[in-house]
Each structure stands twice: as structure tokens, then as C-alpha cells.
Image: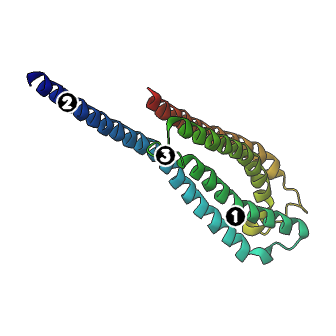
Amino acid sequence: MELEEMQAAWSQMSQDLEKQKQLTDEIILKMTQQKYTSQWNKIFTAEKIGGVVCYVAMVVLLANFKTFDTIALQVSAILCMLILAVLPILSLKTIRGMKQVNVTKMNYKETMETYAKGKKNFVNFQKLNVGISFLFMLLTVPVSAKLFNDENLFETLDPKLGIAAPFMLVFFGLLVWFVTRCYKKVLRSSETILKEIEE
């Protein structure tokens, strides 16, 4: 009888320990998910604010479209509006792809596959974004000159533009460097958070 009681007590302890381990694992997974999601929520919020700014700028261009009185200016304004309309949507979509990683509902393999797919799309979009943003910067020069100074840079090349161009390129380069650095930091941190699950 004493042996049976010990076996029953031992079995009960094993079950209790197993339940405690499952509960601890669930808490760890929830905390991991929270840390991961928190990082991408910050970027998502910043991109949403950027998207609002883009759409306000697009509305301003659309409201003042009659100001652009030549084909070259109209084409430049239309391209600017297209970029302002499409880039925020694509950006938010790639970030949503990163936010689809859910360690509480996926096993480790599924988690890393979802992360790898999201990361690939995110990185490819950021490369595309740099090229399109550079084009956008070039297009905004004549559009802004016409909108704010009523000056058509396609007809009169202002020497000030030659002086301003290097500064614009340096500013653009620094901006791309800063944003890329921030995104790489978040990607590295996200990967570290996910790899901790395996351990």
C-alpha cells in the first residue's frame, strides 16, 4: 500500500510538473510574441503617419493640378501622385507580412518560414523603395518650383538648382542610410527574439 501511495504521489507530482512546464512555456511564448509584435508596431505606426503625410501631399497636388500647365509638369505631377498613392500601401503591406509571425499559434519551423518569407519581401521592397524615392525626389523639384514659385524649371534652368542638387543628394543619402540602419536593427532584433524560442 505504501508503495502504491508513493507511486500515485509521484504520478501526481509528474502531472503537476508537466502542467507547470506547459504554463511556463505558454507565458514565455506570449512574452516573446509581445516583444516581437511591439517592435513591428512601432514601425507600422511610423509608416502609417508617413502614409497620411503622403496622402495629404497627393491631395494638395491634385487640388492644384491646373497649376501644372505643360505636359512635362503634368507628367511629373501625375508620377508624384502615383508614387504618393502606391508606396504607403506597399510599405504597410510588407510590414503586415512581418507581423503575421505568431509564435503562439505556429511551431518553430512555421514561425521561421513565415519570418523568412516576410523578411525577403520586406528587404526587397526597401530596395525598390530607395530607387522610387530617388525618382520621387527628382520629380518633386520641378513640381515644387511650379507650385510654390510659379517657375517652370523645364523651360528655365535656374543656376541655383545646380547648387541645391548636391545638398539634396547628400540629404537623401543620409536619410536612406538612417532608415536602412533602423530597419536592419529591427530585423536583427526580431530574428534574435525568434531564435530564443528554439533554446
Asked which secondary structure carries label 3, the reply is loop
Q: Which residue does the numbered mark 1 point to in the structure image?
A: 85
Q: Quadrant of residue 6?
A: top left
Asked which secondary structure carries label 2, the reply is helix
Q: Amino acid at mark 2?
A: Met
From this view, report whether residue 75 is shown above or below residue 184: below
Towards the viewer: 186 or 156: 186
Q: Residue at x 84, y 55 (%)?
A: 158
Q: Nearer the viewer, mark 2 or mark 3?
A: 2
Q: In the rendered structure, are the residues bearing label 1 and label 2 in contact, judged by CB atoms less than 8 Å apart? A: no
Which numbered disc, 2 or 3, marks the residue that appears first in the sequence?
2
Left or right relative to 7: residue 42: right
For the question of whether residue 144 can be seen, the reply is: no
Label 2 and label 3: CA atoms lie apart by: 32 Å
Left or right relative to 121: residue 30: left
Q: Position of residue 73 (x, y in %)?
A: 85, 66
Q: Position of residue 136 (x, y in %)?
A: 76, 55
Q: Which residue does the numbered mark 2 point to in the structure image?
A: 13
Towards the viewer: 33 or 183: 33
Q: Amino acid at mark 3?
A: Asn
Question: Quick one: which residue is furthest to the front in this view?
Answer: 1
Asked which secondary structure carries label 1, the reply is helix
Q: Amino acid at mark 1?
A: Ala
User: How many C-alpha atoms fall within 10 Å of the one at disc 2: few (<14), some, or many (≥20)?
Assistant: few
Label 1 and label 2: CA atoms lie apart by: 61 Å
Which numbered disc, 1 or 3, marks the residue that appears first in the sequence?
1
